[in-house]
Amino acid sequence: MNKKLVLAGMFCTLATTAVAQEENRKEEKWYQYDHLYFQFGTYFHYHHSDDHAGNNLFGSLEAQKSNHWLYGLALFDNSFGQFSQYLYGGYQWQLPGDYENFHFKLTAGVIHGYKEPWDDKIPFNSKNGWAPGLIPGIGYKKNGWGIDMIFLGNSALLFTLGKDFNFQ
């Protein structure tokens, strides 16, 4: 499938969602949040490669807003043992009714850390190791604890355990 067509479709989906959600927003400033959500986990590759090194550990801190928007920073060693970061924003959709503890999350941001000789392992990566990222996931959260399964393109699945922290 044409990469430009896929990217255009994803952009349109995000833009449409943003416009639709704008009507339901409270008067929150961009930096205000409802609670912090800390996640840690590990990822598993779909296919084995002798190039895979590193410890597969992942940690992130998200500021989650009452209107379901979020922003965060993830720190991890990539598949090749290089320290990497993902700075992102996104939205979390809660399922209705009896399934309200289930959610779908989509984040978009910038990934840094995939450098030579593995700089070609993620799309649109620069020689300096910077690339755009669009990462979907599904999860379940109840009583401040959550689990998520996050899809890392055609490379791996990330499984996380998370905890809400409310300091307000």
Image (cartoon, rainbow, N blue to C red):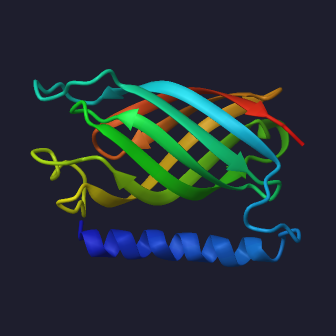
Quadrant in the picture for residue 124:
bottom left
Quadrant containing the N terminus in the rendered view: bottom left
Q: Residue at x 43, y 41 (%)?
A: 151
Q: Residue at x 61, y 40 (%)?
A: 61
Quadrant in the picture for residue 40:
top right
Residue 126, image x and y in percent? 21, 63
Report the side of 59 relative to 111 (left or right).
Answer: right
Q: Residue furthest top?
A: 55
Residue 128, image x and y in percent? 22, 58
Residue 37's place in the image compared with 143, above or below, is below
Q: Nearer the viewer, residue 160 or 82?
A: 82
Q: Nearer the viewer, residue 103 or 118?
A: 118
Residue 83, image x and y in percent? 32, 37
How many numbered marks, from 0 up? Answer: 0
Residue 159's place in the image compared with 74, above or below, is above
Residue 81, image x and y in percent? 24, 30
Residue 84's place in the image compared with 45, above or below, is below
Q: Nearer the viewer, residue 161 or 128?
A: 128
Q: Nearer the viewer, residue 110 or 42?
A: 110
Q: Residue at x 72, y 75 (%)?
A: 20
Report the side of 97 relative to 60 (left or right).
Answer: right
Report the side of 74 relative to 168 (left or right).
Answer: left
Quadrant containing the C terminus in the rendered view: top right
